Amino acid sequence: MTAVAAPVETDEAVLLERIADAGSRVLAPHAESVDKRGRFPTEGVDELRRLRLMGAAAPVQAGGLGLDPAALARVGTAIARHCGATGMIWAMSQLQLACLVGFGGPAHDRYVTDVCASQHLIASVTSEVSTGGNMRRSDAAAVPDGDGAIAFRKDATTVSYGAQADSLLVTLRRSDTAEPTDQVLLLARRDQITLTPTGTWDTLGMRGTCSPPFQLTGRVPTDQLLPVPFGDIAAACMVPLSHLLWAAVWLGIAEDAFRRATAAATGRARRAAGRAGGPVGDPRLAQVHTDLQTLRCVVAGFGDRYTHTDPAGRSGPGMAVEANTVKLAASDLALRVVLGALDVCGIDGYRETGELSVARQLRDICSARLMISNHTLLTLNSELLMLTRRQS
Amino acid sequence: MTDINARATQAVRGVLAAHGTLHADPWRIGTGDDLYAAGLTSMGSVHVLLALEDALGIEFPDRVLDRALFSSIESLTRAAAACLHAGHPLPVSA
């Protein structure tokens, strides 16, 4: 591969500053049309590419930014402050990239270099019509197809930005005789597959993620199968890191709503300042802030813990319980922050447009409780807690 | 700029008189006198800030909002005049 032409900025503080600039200049101004039309946030994603952020989770030697999970979370929050859909798309792509970096073979190492050089977007195909949202079961199988290739066909319930992705990571049964839980993860480049949408993505929120159901068929060289069983990748990376990065994105959305609530409360106090009695505070703003600060602690705490846990120790049930708890807490807290912000902003918050609107943020944050439903995670955690009862 | 300075000084003293909770008469104290020593509390400074923004139709940028801003009539006037000069208008919807 040729080296990246532009010098790569890897300093986090500089990156966050540049994201803030790109966010207010490009992401935020387009967020409304992305949401309204349910279209892919091309302008925002192009800005992230310009900042080389599509390679954020890849090592510097591969042309990436070499950010650790905690830093990835902070970047996700910074992006989502301006557009939740753009933040979520970026976070999901980094998650896939992290799986390739951590668990790939030589073919994947080569591809990671391509991702950084060409700023590829990587999608995930874990859901399946016949198994629902349970990522740890597959019906579709990897079938040997001669010449060192495997063929597959999968009906997925949702594939976020599937139509815009440069490559996809697909979960499959190891073979057509394997158990549904005996899964592998396959890297498929866009030109190796046929992707047919079988429905639409016309949803309450997160409309810009463009996540309709798709049918995929493909024929892919066998060396594009990740050499590690999918169960190991899910336990050590895909589950905990997805919960961290999703929570970070929800934090960004909550911060956006809080900023608007602060502006609304300040505006009211300012107008009251000219009248008898003087300005008064709005205790609801302080309550929203309390929830926001708690959310920040939840995300930062898990970011540090996951980052500083040796990769070998990341796959135990303790980490799973903790990651699930972070997802549960963050989805609740973020919703409370945005709902509280709506109370503070009042009717201007309820409007779909304007500086004090939190309508898009509220619709977007409702997805948090459903991205792996909180009900499923509570059930799972209640069982895992019996396994980890001595530590939890 | 002189007009702006005069307007800002007038507004600062007026707002301090209405919201500053000072022991001394805000119309008579020196521009360099320590407002905290004169009785300005942190809650009082919030009220002064909001009333000043309302009176002048400006919004102070976050970076100038620190304890030093409220330390004297001079520093408040300088910051308010800079806002008036640079045109940091209040957000329309706020």
Image: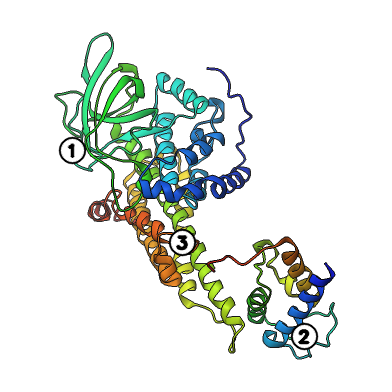
Disc 2 versus disc 3: distance between alpha carbons? 38 Å
Question: Is residue A185 visible in the rendered structure shown here?
Answer: yes
Taking the image as drawn, is residue A319 in sight?
A: no
With respect to residue A99, does A109 lie above or below? Answer: above
Q: Nearer the viewer, residue A222 or A122?
A: A122
Vertical order, B45 against A310 (above or below)? below
User: Residue at left 56%, top 77%?
Assistant: A269
- Image location (x, y in percent) of residue A242: 38, 44
Residue that badge 2 annotates: B38
Q: Chain of mark 3?
A: A
State the image quarter where residue A106 is shown: top left
Residue A257 disc label:
3
* Residue identifier under label 1: A129
Labels 3, 1: front one: 3
Which kind of residue does numbered mark 1 sit on? Val
Residue A156: x %, y % from top left: 23, 35
Q: Is residue A217 above or below residue A50?
A: above
Give the amino acid at mark 3. Answer: Ala
